[in-house]
C-alpha cells in the first residue's frame, strides 16, 4: 500500500506543478532566494534606482549654460550611478540564471526523475493484485512490463493515476471561470464620452427644401 500511495503522490505533485506552471513557481522561488541570499544587493539596487531618478530630475531642471559646474557634477553622478546599477543588474541576472538551472534540475528530480526511479526500482513488484478473473483476458496487460500476472504494475498504476488526475483537473477548470486580463480590464474600464455619444440615438436632422 505504501508503493500505491507513493506513486499517486508523485503523479499528483507532477500534475499540480504542471497546472500551476513552472514559470510561476520559478519566479516566486527566485524572489524568495534573492531576498534570503542577496538582500543587501537588492536593497542597494533599489536605493541606487531612487538616487539615479532623483539626480536625473534635478539634472533636467539645471541649465547646462547658466549652471555648468552643477550640471557637470550631476551628469557625472548619473553616469556613475548607471554604471554601478549595470554592475548590480549583471550580478543579480547571473544569480537568477544559476538559480534557474538548479531549480529546474531539482524540480525534474522531484517529479519526472522520482517517477522514473520508482518505476524502475519496483518494476517487478506488484502495486496490488486484482481479483481473479476480474477483467478476464485483459488482465495481463496491467502487469506489463515485468509485474506478476494478475497484478497491477507501477507503470500501469502511474498511467491510471495520471488519467484520473487529469479528468479531475478538467472538471475543476469547468467550475472555476478564468477571465483573461484583457477582458477584465475592458470590463472594468469606464466608457469614454465619445463611445457614450455614439451609443445615444441620434435625432433625424431636418432637411430644408429650397
Image (cartoon, rainbow, N blue to C red):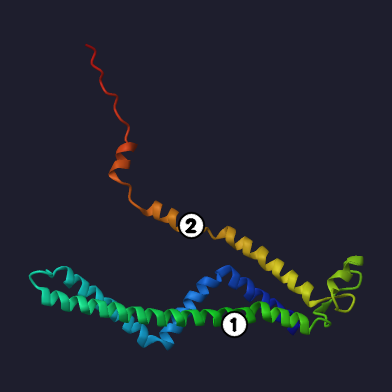
x then y, percent, for residue 176: 54, 60
Q: Residue at x 14, y 68 (%)?
A: 61
Q: Residue at x 43, y 87 (%)?
A: 36
> What residue does disc 2 label?
179
Q: Residue at x 40, y 52 (%)?
A: 186
Q: How many marks?
A: 2
The C terminus: image quadrant: top left
Q: Circle 2 — which element?
A: loop
Of the residues under marks 2 and 1, which one precedes in the sequence?
1
Q: CA distance from mark 2 to mark 1?
A: 32 Å
Q: Nearer the viewer, mark 2 or mark 1?
A: 1
x then y, percent, for residue 18: 60, 70
Image quadrant of residue 195? top left
| 198 horizontally vs 118: left or right | left
Image quadrant of residue 204? top left
Q: Is residue 137 above or below residue 99?
A: above
Residue ranking furthest to the top: 210
Give the camera-side residue of 130 and 34: 34
> What residue does disc 1 label?
106
The N terminus: image quadrant: bottom right
* Residue 15 visible in the shown view: yes
Give the camera-side residue of 181 and 175: 181
| 187 horizontally vs 26: left or right | left
Q: Residue at x 17, y 71 (%)?
A: 59
Amino acid at each position: 500500500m505504501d508503493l500505491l500511495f507513493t506513486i499517486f503522490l508523485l503523479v499528483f505533485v507532477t500534475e499540480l506543478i504542471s497546472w500551476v506552471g513552472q514559470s510561476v513557481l520559478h519566479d516566486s522561488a527566485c524572489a524568495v532566494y534573492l531576498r534570503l541570499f542577496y538582500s543587501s544587493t537588492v536593497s542597494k539596487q533599489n536605493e541606487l534606482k531612487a538616487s539615479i531618478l532623483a539626480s536625473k530630475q534635478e539634472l533636467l531642471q539645471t541649465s547646462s549654460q547658466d549652471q555648468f559646474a552643477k550640471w557637470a557634477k550631476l551628469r557625472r553622478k548619473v553616469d556613475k550611478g548607471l554604471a554601478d546599477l549595470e554592475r548590480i543588474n549583471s550580478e543579480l541576472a547571473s544569480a537568477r540564471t544559476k538559480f534557474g538551472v538548479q531549480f529546474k534540475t531539482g524540480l525534474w528530480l522531484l517529479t519526472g526523475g522520482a517517477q522514473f526511479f520508482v518505476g524502475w526500482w519496483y518494476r517487478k513488484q506488484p502495486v496490488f493484485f486484482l481479483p481473479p478473473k476480474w477483467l478476464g483476458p485483459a488482465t495481463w496487460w496491467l502487469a506489463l512490463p515485468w509485474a506478476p500476472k494478475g497484478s497491477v504494475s507501477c507503470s500501469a498504476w502511474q498511467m491510471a493515476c495520471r488519467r484520473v488526475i487529469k479528468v479531475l483537473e478538467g472538471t475543476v477548470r469547468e467550475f472555476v471561470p478564468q477571465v483573461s486580463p484583457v477582458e477584465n480590464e475592458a470590463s472594468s474600464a469606464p466608457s469614454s464620452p465619445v463611445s457614450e455619444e455614439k451609443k445615444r440615438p441620434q435625432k433625424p436632422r431636418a432637411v430644408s427644401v429650397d
